[in-house]
């Protein structure tokens, strides 16, 4: 068998000498390339070929704040579907007050149907923003003001929102929130 090497960014230290059994994402192959084996593209998976162009939407801390405010304002509507509209179709939500990862629109709506009963209002206490081409990560600490059984309470939590610019707008592709282990 002929030895091949693949340059896939982020995989240094992995032996790429065999093409057998290597899966190729649909987005990286033409209809004439095999799904596995010798039809594997030799270019890095996150690098456009010279014939492709790439537009990177501007992203900064101000955008992160605006996207959080948009999400927080959607919470204030009390409508789970409006909150879910901010998530990409393939998003994952790892919520604060549920042990169940939410990986579909219906599951995200189900979570927010219950969470919104507590009339949540989020306030960012600390933010760390990382920018990339059409990606934005906002991670830090927030506090939620909640009302449960007529009693107001505050819940401190860590959060991560990963946004991706798709079809002309920013969508949440990953949201993780967990209570502080105080």
Image (tube, grey):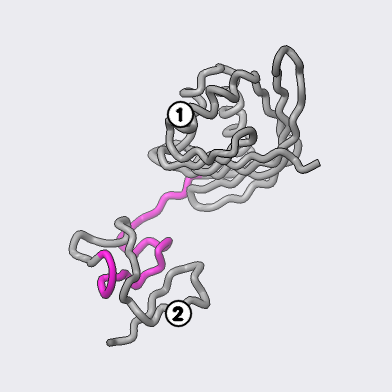
Residue 97 vs residue 172, the one in the foreground: 97
Residue 58 position (above or below residue 19)? above
Q: For mark 2, does the 10 Å Cα neighbourhood hold few (<14), some (14 to 19), or many (20 or more) residues?
A: few
Image coordinates of residue 169 in percent, x first then y, are: 45, 36
Specify whether residue 141 is painted magenta: no
- Residue in view at x 23 percent, y 67 percent: 34
Secondary element type, mark 2: loop
- Residue in view at x 43 percent, y 30 percent: 106
Residue 180 position (above or below residue 11)? above
- Label 2 near label 1: C-beta < 8 Å? no
Residue 36 position (above or below residue 54)? below
Dominant secondary structure (helix, strand or loop) of the stretch shown in magenta: loop
Q: Quadrant of the N terminus?
A: bottom left
The answer to which quarter of the image holds residue 145 is top right
The residue carrying mark 1 is 85
In this picture, residue 84 sits left or right of residue 20: right
Image coordinates of residue 158 in percent, x first then y, are: 70, 41
In this picture, residue 63 sits left or right of residue 34: right
**Dot placed on the residue nearer the N-terminal end, 1 or 2:** 2
The answer to which quarter of the image holds residue 116 is top right
Furthest residue in direction left, as rendered:
32
In this picture, residue 151 sits left or right of residue 167: right
Furthest residue in direction top, as rendered:
150
Furthest residue in direction right, as rendered:
182
- Residue in view at x 37 percent, y 61 percent: 48
The residue carrying mark 2 is 15
Secondary element type, mark 1: loop
Magenta-colored span: 35-57
Residue 149 vs residue 89, the one in the foreground: 149
Q: Quadrant of the C terminus?
A: top right
């Amino acid at each position: 068998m002929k030895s091949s090497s693949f340059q896939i960014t982020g995989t240094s230290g992995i032996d790429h000498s065999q093409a057998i059994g290597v899966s190729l994402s649909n987005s990286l192959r033409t209809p004439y390339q095999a799904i596995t084996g010798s039809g594997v593209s030799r270019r890095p998976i996150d690098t456009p070929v010279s014939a492709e162009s790439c537009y990177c939407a501007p992203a900064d801390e101000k955008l992160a704040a605006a996207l959080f405010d948009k999400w927080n304002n959607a919470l204030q509507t009390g409508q789970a579907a409006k909150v879910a509209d901010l998530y990409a179709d393939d998003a994952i939500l790892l919520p604060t007050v549920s042990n169940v990862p939410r990986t579909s629109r219906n599951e995200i709506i189900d979570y927010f149907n219950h969470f919104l009963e507590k009339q949540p209002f989020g306030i960012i206490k600390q933010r760390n923003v990382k920018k990339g081409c059409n990606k934005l990560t906002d991670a830090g600490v927030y506090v939620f003001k909640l009302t449960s059984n007529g009693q107001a309470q505050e819940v401190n939590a860590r959060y991560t929102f990963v946004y991706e610019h798709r079809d002309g707008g920013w969508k949440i592709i990953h949201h993780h929130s967990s209570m502080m282990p105080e």
